[in-house]
Amino acid sequence: MTAVALPILIPFVLIISLLFVKSVRWARVIAIAGSTVLLCVSVYLFIRLGSEKVITLNAGGWPSPAGITLVVDYLSALMLITASVLLLTISIYSVRFLSVSFDRPKFYLFFFSLAMGLNGSFITGDVFNLYVWFEVMLMSSFVLIAMGSRKEQLEGSIKYLALNLTGSMLFLAGIGLLYGKTGTLNMAHLAEILKNDDQAMLMNTTAMLFFVAFGIKAALFPLFFWLPASYHTPDITVTSLFAGLLTKVGVYAFIRFFTLFFVQDQVFWHNLLLITAGFTMLTGGMSASAHYETRRILSYHIISQIGYMVMGLGIFTPLALAGAIFFTIHNMIAKTNTFLISGIISKMKGTFYLKDIGGLYKQNPFLAVLFIIPAFALAGIPPLSGFFGKFMLIKAGLEDKHYVITTVAVFTGILTLYSMIKIWNEAFLKKQPDNAFNQSGKIKTGFIEVLPSVILGLVSILMGLFAATVFQYTLEAANQLIDPTIYIEKVLHTLKQ
Amino acid sequence: METLLAILVGILYTAGFYMLLRRSILKFIIGIIFLSNATNLLVFLSAGLVAGSPAFIKDGNMQAEKTADPLPQALVLTAIVIGLGILVFTLALKYKYFEVTGTDDLDQLKKTDD
C-alpha cells in the first residue's frame, strides 16, 4: 500500500518547498499545516492496521528481500502517531519561542529533515536503510544543535557529534558483519534465517556492535555522557524537539532488533539489558537531584527514564514489552511538555537557574497547573499516564521474579518525584528572590504560548483516563513483537508464492 | 588478500580511536576519517573478495561463484557519501569553533559538563 511511504514523502515535499520560502510567517504556516497532515497520515495508517495487522510496501517495486521494504506494524504506528503529535506541538511552540537570531525559515527546513529521518527509522524494514535514516536524522540534529553558534553551543555540539559519530561507525560496522554472516539485510529475512541459528555465540559479536551503537543513541549507561553535556546548550525549541524524539529512536531500534532477530542468546542479552537499565535509571535519577538548572535536571531525567523502557525489553514478557511501549509514548509526551514549560518559565524570568526564580504560583496559577500535569505524570502519580506505564513494568518485573530491577525502578520513581518537587518548590512555591530578574505582580501568558503545553497535558490526562484502551494497542504491539510470524510472512510473502 | 585487508581494517580502527583521544580537534577529525574508512573497508569485505569478476554480467548468464556480490559495493558507495557529508560538517564546525574561541584544544571544552 503506497500510503506507507507518505510519512517519509510528506516531510520531503515540505523540505523542498521550504527551500524557496523566505518569509517566517509562511514557513510557520507550512510547518504547522505539514505536521497536521503528518499526524492525519499516521492516524490513517494506524486505523488501517486494525484490519491488516502489518502493512508493507516494497520501495521501487523490488520484491523483498532484494529491495527495501517499508513496514508498519503496531509499534511503528504508535511511535509515528506520538512523534507527529510532538512535531505538531513543537511547530506551534516555535512560533513564539524560536530565537529571533536564527534564520528561522531554515530552522523549519531542518525540523522536517529531522522528521523525515525519524519517520523513516520507524517504518523501514531494512537494516542498512535504518542506518541511512539515522544519518539523515543525525545530520539535521547536528545543524539544529549548532544553530546560533554561541560558544557553549558549539562546545555542546562537538561533544554531541563526537559520541554520536562513533555510534554511527559502530552501527555501520555491525551492518557489515551482519551481512557477512547472513547474506541479507532485510529484517524479516534476518529473523527467518537467525530463528533457527544454532551458533548463537557467533552472532553475539555483531549484536554487541549494535548494542553499543544503539546504547549511544538511546543514552544508556555508561554511554550517555553526550546528552547532559549538550542538551542544555541550544535554543529551548530545539532541546524540546531532541528531548522527546532522538533518544527514543534508539530505544525503538533496541526493541526492534532484540525482539525480531537478535533472539538467540536470550539469557545473556536480557541480563545485560536489565543491568544497564538499572544503572541508567540510578545514575540518571541521582544526577538529576544534584542540579539546579531546569534543563539539566530534565536532561538527566531523560536518561533515567530510558532505563525504564530498556527494563521492559529486558524482562521480555508481553506485559513488560507493552509496558515499555506505553511508557515510551507517555514519556515522549510528558518529557517534551516539561521542557516546553521550562522554556515558558525562562522566557518570563530570563533564566533557567532555579535559585533565581520563584513565586510563579502566585504570579501565574495557570502555568502552575500546566506544569503539575506532566511533572506528576513523570513521577507516576495516578490517574496520569506515567502511573500506568510504571505499574505495568513493575508488575511484569514482579511476575517474572526480577526483584532487583523492580526495586531499582521503584526507588528511581522516588528520585523522579524528588526532582519534580524540587522544581515545583523552587520555581512555583518559593518567594521570588531579590535579584535582577525581580518581577512582581501577575505575569500573563499568551494563548499560543501555552497551547502546546495544553495539548500535551490533555494527552497525558487522556492517556491516563483511557489507559485500558491504549494498553490494548500496546499489548497488541508487544504480541506482534514477541511472535513476529505475521511480520515475517507479510514482508516475505512474495518469496513464498 | 582478505587477511591482509582485515589486518589493515584493524590498524585503521586503532589509529582512528587513538586520534579520537588526542587533544586537538583537528586530530579528532582525522580520527573520524580513519574510523570512517576502516568501517567502509569492513563493509566492503563483508561479502568476501572475488578477484577479477564484475558485479553484473550482461545477458543474465550469471553464476553465483563467478560474480562479485554487488550489494556491499552499493552499501559502501552510500556510506562513503554519508561519511563525506559528515566530514565536511565536522570541519565547518571546527572552523566556527576556532573562530569563536580561538582555540583548538579539546581540554578547553569543560564548560558544559558540570
Image (cartoon, rainbow, N blue to C red):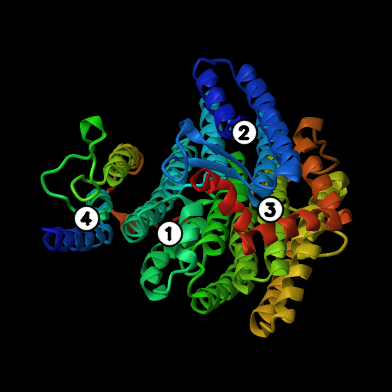
Residue type pointed to by label 3: Lys
For the N terminus of chain A, the quadrant is top right
Q: Disc 1 designates what residue?
A: A213
Q: Earlier in the sequence, mark 2 or mark 1?
A: 2
* Circle 3 Cα neighbour tier, 10 Å, few/some/many (<14 / 14–19 / ≥20): many
Q: Are marks 3 and 2 on the same chain?
A: yes
- Secondary element under disc 4, as helix, strand or loop, is loop
Contact between marks 2 and 1 (CB within 8 A): the answer is no
Where is A290 relative to A235, above or below? below
- Secondary element under disc 2, as helix, strand or loop, is loop
Residue type pointed to by label 2: Met
C-alpha distance separating marks 3 and 2: 34 Å
Q: Disc 3 designates what residue?
A: A335
Q: What percent of the width, then of the height, locates residue A252? A: 57, 55
Q: Disc 2 designates what residue?
A: A1
Please indicate, yes or no, whether residue A296 appears anywhere in the rendered image.
Answer: yes
Tell me the subunit letter for badge 2. A
Q: What percent of the width, then of the height, locates residue A90? A: 67, 37
Q: Observer-nearest residue: A135 or A95? A: A135
Q: Are marks 1 and 3 on the same chain?
A: yes
Residue type pointed to by label 4: Gly
Where is A389 relative to A347, above or below? below
Residue at the image point whose x is 21% and y is 63% from the top? B14
Q: Are marks 2 and 1 on the same chain?
A: yes
Q: Observer-nearest residue: A215 or A369? A: A215
Residue type pointed to by label 1: Ala
